[in-house]
Image (cartoon, rainbow, N blue to C red):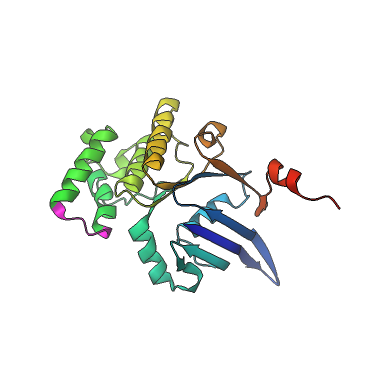
């Protein structure tokens, strides 16, 4: 589903460059559940933004569902994002002037779901996340945890082929966090590809494998290190 080859992200700092990601080569198969971990500043969220086609200032090759993303203009990348990708943002990114109901409806409108069907899907999602009583509230009227739940609900409501989640349980209490990870597991079992960024070993245990980042580089696993020939 995803193939990255020598992807790099940097920012000019005078005559030099400050690299956030270095020579990232990574394949993610359709149906995988992958965790990205590493210390703060390792480049995890930047990598997730590139995968979600929200960051366009990178170099290298990126293929998604057979499309050469690196050769597409930003507008076409945004279209791929809207059609195939759900994103749980660390900072929620809810639209402040829309109600909970309206925030949930947006991804369905991108996929040309008919209004009557949209209403049924939003109603079912509100019930699943136990937010029926908050459907007419605005984000500013919600707690951080409630906003995060809305963000998760919005990301999964249209059953995207790829779900990207940046610290999806960061502001939830432990029971809510477990529910979200169990939901992700069910969605993955139904065929959804999931990539999450987390500091939580518990959350990482739900995934098939973990990719470690450090200072913008992918750190080889102990198994890969052990398999390297010695000189």
Residue 22 occupies quadrant = bottom right
Q: Position of residue 217 (x, y in %)?
A: 67, 54
Boundaries of the magenta span: 110-115
Work out which residue is located at the far left of the displayed protein and give it: 116
Picture layout, residue 36 above or below residue 9 = above
Which residue lies most toward the right here? 231
- Residue 117 visible in the displayed image: yes
The secondary structure that most of the magenta stretch takes on is: loop
Q: Position of residue 152 (x, y in %)?
A: 37, 42
Query: Which residue: 54% across, 36% down?
Result: 204
Report which quarter residue 14 is drawn in.
bottom right
Estimate the x, y position of residue 75 in percent, counting from the top left: 39, 71
> Is 143 on the left-hand or right-hand side of 4?
left
Q: Residue at x 21, y 33 (%)?
A: 133
Position in image of residue 1 (x %, y %): 46, 57
Q: Choose between 214 and 112: the one closer to the eye.
A: 112
């Amino acid at each position: 589903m995803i193939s990255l080859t020598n992807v790099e992200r940097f920012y000019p700092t005078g005559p030099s460059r400050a690299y956030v990601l270095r020579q990232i080569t990574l394949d993610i198969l359709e149906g995988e559940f992958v965790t990205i971990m590493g210390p703060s500043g390792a480049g995890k969220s930047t990598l997730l933004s590139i995968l979600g086609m929200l960051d366009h200032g990178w170099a290298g090759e990126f293929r998604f569902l057979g499309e050469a993303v690196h050769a597409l203009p930003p507008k076409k990348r945004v279209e791929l994002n809207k059609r195939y990708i759900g994103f749980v943002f660390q900072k929620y990114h809810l639209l402040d002037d829309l109600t909970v109901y309206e925030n949930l409806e947006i991804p369905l409108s991108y996929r040309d779901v008919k209004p009557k069907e949209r209403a049924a899907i939003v109603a079912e999602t509100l019930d699943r996340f136990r937010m029926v009583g908050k459907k007419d509230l605005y984000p500013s009227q919600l707690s951080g945890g409630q906003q995060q739940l809305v963000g998760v609900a919005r990301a999964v409501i249209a059953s995207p082929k790829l779900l990207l989640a940046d610290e999806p349980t960061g502001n939830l209490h432990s029971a809510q966090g477990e529910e979200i990870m169990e939901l992700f597991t069910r969605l993955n079992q139904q065929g959804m590809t999931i990539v999450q960024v987390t500091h939580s070993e518990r959350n990482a245990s739900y995934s098939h494998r973990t990719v470690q980042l450090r200072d913008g580089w992918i750190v080889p696993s102990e198994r890969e290190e052990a398999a390297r020939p010695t000189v």
